[in-house]
Amino acid sequence: MRLLKVATCNLNQWAMDFDCNLNNIKESITQAKQAGAVIRLGPELEITGYGCEDHFLELDTINHGWECLKEILVGDWTDGILCSIGMPVIKGSERYNCQVLCFNRKIIMIRPKMWLANDGNYRELRWFTAWKHKDQLVDFQLPSEIAEAVLQQSVPFGYGYVRFLDTAVAAEVCEELFTPIPPHAELALNGVEVFMNASGSHHQLRKLDVRLRAFIGATHTRGGVYMYSNQQGCDGGRLYYDGCSCVVVNGEVVVQGSQFSLRDIEVVTAQVDLDAVASLRGSISSFQEQASCKNTVASVLVPYKLCQPFNMQMSLSSPLQINYHSPEEEIAFGPGCWLWDYLRRSGASGFLLPLSGGADSSSVAAIVGCMCQLVVKEIEKGDEQVKADAIRIGNYTDGQFPTDSKEFAKRIFYTVFMGSENSSEDTKKRAKDLADEIGSWHLDVSIDGVVSALLSLFQTLTGKRPRYKVDGGSNIENLGLQNIQARIRMVLAFMLASLLPWVHSKPGFYLVLGSSNVDEGLRGYLTKYDCSSADINPIGSISKQDLRAFLRWAAVHLGYSSLAEIEAAPPTAELEPIRSNYSQLDEVDMGMTYEELSVYGRLRKIFRCGPVSMFKNLCYRWGSRLSPSEVADKVKHFFKYYSINRHKMTVLTPSYHAESYSPEDNRFDLRQFLYNARWPYQFSKIDELVKELDGDKVAFGETSDQDKSRANGLGMGVVAAGSGDPKSGL
């Protein structure tokens, strides 16, 4: 037997905070060595942090990376342990995303990334060059200070692997695993048994299984030990890196780290038998045949043994059941951990949330409540860093620290119900009940006086006073009156966030939390510069459907029972007067349901559909219920309002990224914000298709009355059963 102990880790790095990142790296190496590991793998670009973006273009960033690496190398950190450390490196005039393999205070080789992530949230080609020379390792001249410190002038640079006396080890960096022809296939044929994947992978609902299937597939048919390391936490942007570092042996997961955690450092180790890898490969005839005619990959020899012989005191890591969180748990824990990182690193003393008693703001409140619960639990487990941050943020004195989540929430969380004459007593009560369950400092505020003052000023200026539509006013008046209320709430929220801590003799300021969901952003069903305008928004890319499911889950699992009543209430903005014959409802206002919006969003973004393609797809999906002309009307209605309101995305509050059809304008969904909202060319094409389809139906004997009967009971905004289900594949 060749027994090998390996360590991989989740690290909560912070872009451009070199002290923080270096300390985390050192501590992870220390923990790996204490556990007896001889290989330690860290996340991609761990020295700088993955999310530096245009800071990667600064020479300072590169130089500071080398300075940190030098500090690791001149100490005893790498003695007896192979460390793969991520950092940017400039070779000649090109900048590369690299894994630096270090052992016994020397750099063994530098492995540049060959296939860069350059879609979705990723722009690596903006900052890095892909390494294209797969046929050789070249000499890289080390910076003079590094060369003097480690007594090395040059090191091998490029695509290759490291040969020890008893095994072979190689790096495969993040995106390379997901390419059509991943490097590990060729490396395995060259005898590499241990693969180290350093990654900077963000959380997205229902995404983890895709990642784990790739690790399992990499070693299931070709054998091997696959190590995966990831960043974890908010490193300064919209993404939450969701950890889940793991080790897979011959297609089976033997150790898995946490996906959501408040810990800065988490090291997981596995004891593996490399003879099991050799045995599997020797039993696969096709592997043997392909290995016999492989393309030779360059390597670096290190005359050292990593493995231990058979030893009954060293137990092997066994396959385990993979831990997957439900989407509801992901919504609670992912944004909750992200909020904690943002809070502790921003210098703020807490959060302020305009709490309307509706589903969206209540979801945000529940996530903050979950964050408070996580903080208390982590302190109970003995995490001194979380404890120190909580003491500072909560302004504890005399050795006190949080022991109860409700008490902690009272110190760091304001909720404000900003009611008007259009608000119902039901929503006011729901907001108060939820605030009591979470423990927030809750206020009830009437904004009617401010609204009246603004309307009086307007009347003085123009001689006219606008009326609501239900009172005989025009659409323009009606919209203007709604927007006044929404924007007053934004101004009031920021005023309270800055001054309430002063009123209560608390230090600092509070961050204002937004609460618009991804579907409202897509449709533009929000007022520009209203309560959707905040400092950060934890639900900005989560669908209404998922939020409703989360509320049902949180009512039970977080202990906030009032959420069940909130979830059951129909969504309403409560910006218009309530009358016996009229009640404002979101889906009526939008002319479509949230279920439909989810379908439109996935087709538009994930499946890259323009109006015509979306019409064709929906004819297949909804054709049993709706006629082509009805489908056309729905598609036109969506694209009209999407394009009219696209400008709102340019000022959208920075939101936690959780959904692949997010319309977020700044990083993810890059499109113009000035459209011809009539879409004349595209809509005319749809009209032509409708005529063709109607003609086909007449030819087959189907009448227009039959068309109508097929859609019987399905008014605007109602879709075929299951068509909006996030799991339906749309």
Image (spheres, grey):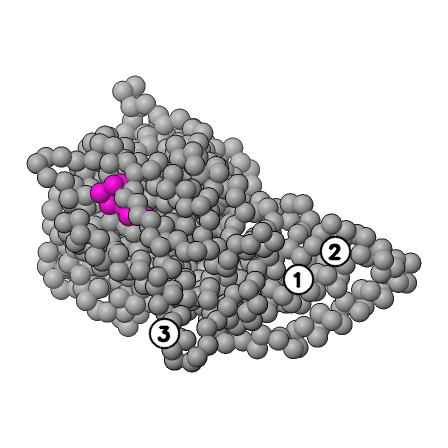
Callout 3: helix, strand or loop?
A: helix
The numbered mark, 1 or 2, whose residue comes first in the sequence reads: 2
426 w.r.t. 14: above or below: above
* Disc on the earlier residue, 3 or 1: 3
User: Label 1 vs label 2: CA separation?
Assistant: 10 Å
Q: The disc labelled 1 sits on which kind of residue?
A: Lys
Number of the label disc, if any, that sits on residue 626: 2
Q: Nearer the viewer, residue 462 or 64?
A: 462
Residue 457: mark in rendering:
3
Residue 482 placed where, x, y %?
Answer: 46, 64
Residue 182 is at least partly visible in this image:
no
- Asked if the residues shown at circle 1 and circle 2 are in contact, with their CB atoms under 8 angstroms apart, the answer is yes
Identity of the amino acid at label 3?
Leu
Indicate whether residue 84 is drawn in magenta: no
Image position, residue 11 (x, y; %): 27, 45
Q: Secondary structure at mark 2?
A: loop
Query: Which numbered disc covers residue 634?
Result: 1
**What's the distance in space between the residues labelled 3 and 1, CA to CA?**
41 Å
